[in-house]
Image (cartoon, rainbow, N blue to C red):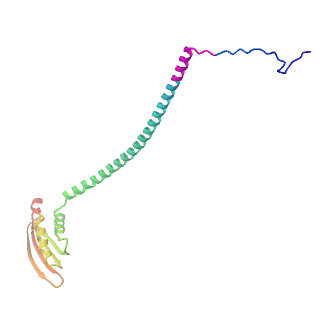
Amino acid sequence: MIKVNLLREHAPRGRKIIIAPTVSRAGIVAVFIFVLTGAALGAWWYYLNNQISTLTATRNRLRAENARLETIKKQINDYEKIKQLLQGRIDVIEKLKEYQSSPVLLLNHVIQSIPKDSSMWLTQLDQKEDRVQIVGFSPKADAIPDFMSNLAASGFFKTVDLDSFEDQKEAAKFSLSCISKRNEATE
């Protein structure tokens, strides 16, 4: 049979040998290079991480700006289409103005010559060749000379003469004789 002594007191006492570690210069240099390399890699990673976040923010800002510019570009294209449409309408109106006949021009000049601040109504407008007869009423008698001067200033008439003037109770009746310049050019 085998006996095992588990008590410490009975165990043989021996001397333990402690080995003291020795530090070599090559080991210190290797550890220093390893630590320096780790620090350099950490700093490089930190720098790259900051660059990535900065460039990502710049990319997002530029994408938002690009989207905004695209919407503005679409609006500009829409406005250009509207502008072309309106310009086409203006061109049609200008062509119609060029092709207006003499009676339409006569009416335009007579209507534009009526004073804005007075009420006046015309009862007769008659044109025979270059002679135009205008008959009407006005509640203010002083509006008739303004009407005559506006007709003369329009450039459509050579002369504007007052044929008759009747001051009635509610309105003044007048009759004008005008000689047209435009009729000569159209014939």
Residue 167 quadrant? bottom left
- State the quadrant of the C terminus: bottom left
Above or below, 30 relative to 47: above
Above or below, 130 relative to 55: below
Of 71 and 84, the residue lying toward us: 71
User: Measuring 16% from the left and 72% from the top, which residue is drawn there?
Assistant: 125
**Percent position of residue 3, x then y:** 89, 17
User: Measuring 24% from the left and 57% from the top, which residue is drawn there?
Assistant: 93
**Percent position of residue 118, x then y:** 19, 74
Q: Which residue lies furthest to the bottom in this view?
A: 169
Q: Is residue 176 left or right of residue 93?
A: left
Of 83 and 129, the residue lying toward us: 83
Q: In the image, is residue 80 part of the stretch drawn in magenta?
A: no
Of 125 and 81, the residue lying toward us: 81
| Secondary structure mainly formed by the magenta segment | helix
User: Measuring 45% from the left and 39% from the top, which residue is drawn there?
Assistant: 57
Above or below, 33 relative to 170: above
- State the quadrant of the N terminus: top right
Magenta segment, which residues? 21-36
Please state the total of marks drawn on the protein image. Answer: 0
Residue 139 quadrant? bottom left
User: Measuring 15% from the left and 84% from the top, which residue is drawn there?
Assistant: 168
**Percent position of residue 127, x then y:** 13, 69
Residue 156 quadrant? bottom left
Q: Is residue 67 left or right of residue 151?
A: right
**Percent position of residue 81, x then y:** 33, 49
